[in-house]
DNA sequence: TTGCGTGCAAAGGTTTTGCATGGCA
DNA sequence: TGCCATGCAAAACCTTTGCACGCAA
């Protein structure tokens, strides 16, 4: 099945340019819209969702959800960091709600174990580790 | 800070009884409401959300989200499997939607690493590994 | 010229909230 | 009796959809 021909539009270029200025960061559709509004450019909500979803399909961007009440997050994937070594993993603190980006070499090895011994191929971009961050652990005592 | 006194109500008992009949299964708030409606009992939407969220706080139930458009899932946690040795870990297949319960001794060790080297205390009951199950991987070829 | 992209507004669906009433302790 | 729980409806919120028009190729 062929996919439809895709056009390169000004909005798409603007979106990609913006995303490239914030590598590794998470933004919501509404964050993106606010950024353009602050810079005098208006992009419709639907357009932002449509372009972002298209980029997810194209593998340029990942999308993930922390929980059902907060909006979806999008993150631009830098082409040069597509190698397994520099992927960041997401830890969400259940107490303060902060999302910590973890760079840990043991995680890919752990995922490899799960694949080889349990046949399940973990999607690193999608999986979120829930727990308590060090700051909140200290406060708890 | 003290937490408020909590009451034991008929709706709460009904909800817990129902959840205990479907251990390891995931239900949405709307599934739960439909179940009671089919059995002639009416429980308001808000009540279901409020009780379910309270059970999550109490550690009786876990809640997780597949993506931002589908509703949140709730799962009753059987008390007898609360001991560390028999905790099962949840893997959700992004393709077929199935949830695989994994018993793996490397997971607690991995979580220990995250805690000791990165200061983040993973909550095993809440964390869900997203990815592709072996069946779907085979179908993909 | 063809058909994809866009804007706007409306619709769709889930979850939360306000308030009066009912029920547990 | 004092709070907490509930029901109902409305509100809030994110995301998708329909349609007419604009624009890329």
Image (spheres, coloured by chain):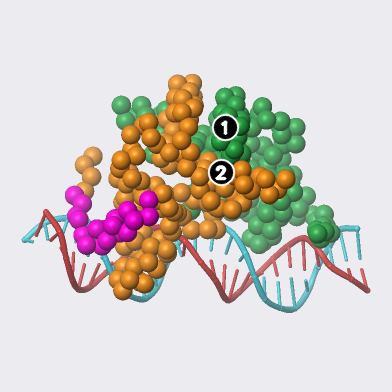
Chain colours: A green, B orange, C red, D cyan
The magenta stretch spans residue A26: no
* Residue B103 at x, y percent in the picture: 46, 35
Q: Marks 2 and 1, how far apart in space?
A: 16 Å
Cβ–Cβ below 8 Å for labels 2 and 1?
A: no
Question: In the rendered image of this protein, does residue C5 appear above or below residue A16?
Answer: below
The structure residue drawn at horizontal position 24% and vertical position 58%, both measured from the top left corner, is B13
Label 2's element?
strand
Q: Which residue is mark 1?
A: A117
Numbered mark located on residue B130 in the image: 2
In what element is the residue under mark 1? helix
Quick check: can you spot residue A7? yes
What residue is at 53 percent from the left and 58 percent from the top? B70
State the extent of the magenta-drawn residues as a range. Answer: B5-23
In the image, taking residue A50 as reference, residue A122 lies left or right, namely: left
Residue A33 point in image, percent of width and height: 63, 54
Q: Nearer the viewer, residue B34 or A74?
A: B34
Q: Position of residue B20 (x, y in %)?
A: 32, 53
Where does the N terminus of chain B fall, quadrant-wise? Answer: top left
């Amino acid at each position: 099945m062929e996919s439809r021909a895709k056009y390169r539009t000004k909005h798409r270029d603007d979106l990609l340019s913006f995303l490239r200025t914030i590598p590794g960061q998470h933004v919501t559709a509404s964050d993106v819209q606010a950024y353009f509004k602050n810079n005098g450019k208006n992009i419709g909500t639907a357009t932002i969702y449509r372009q972002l979803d298209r980029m997810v399909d194209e593998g340029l961007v990942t999308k993930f959800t922390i929980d059902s009440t907060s909006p979806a997050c999008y993150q631009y994937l830098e082409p040069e960091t597509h190698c397994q070594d520099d992927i960041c993993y997401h830890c969400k603190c259940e107490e303060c709600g902060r999302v910590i980006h973890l760079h840990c070499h043991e995680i890919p090895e752990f995922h490899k174990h799960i694949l080889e011994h349990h046949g399940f191929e973990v999607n690193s971009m999608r999986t979120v580790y829930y727990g308590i961050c060090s700051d909140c652990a200290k406060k708890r005592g």
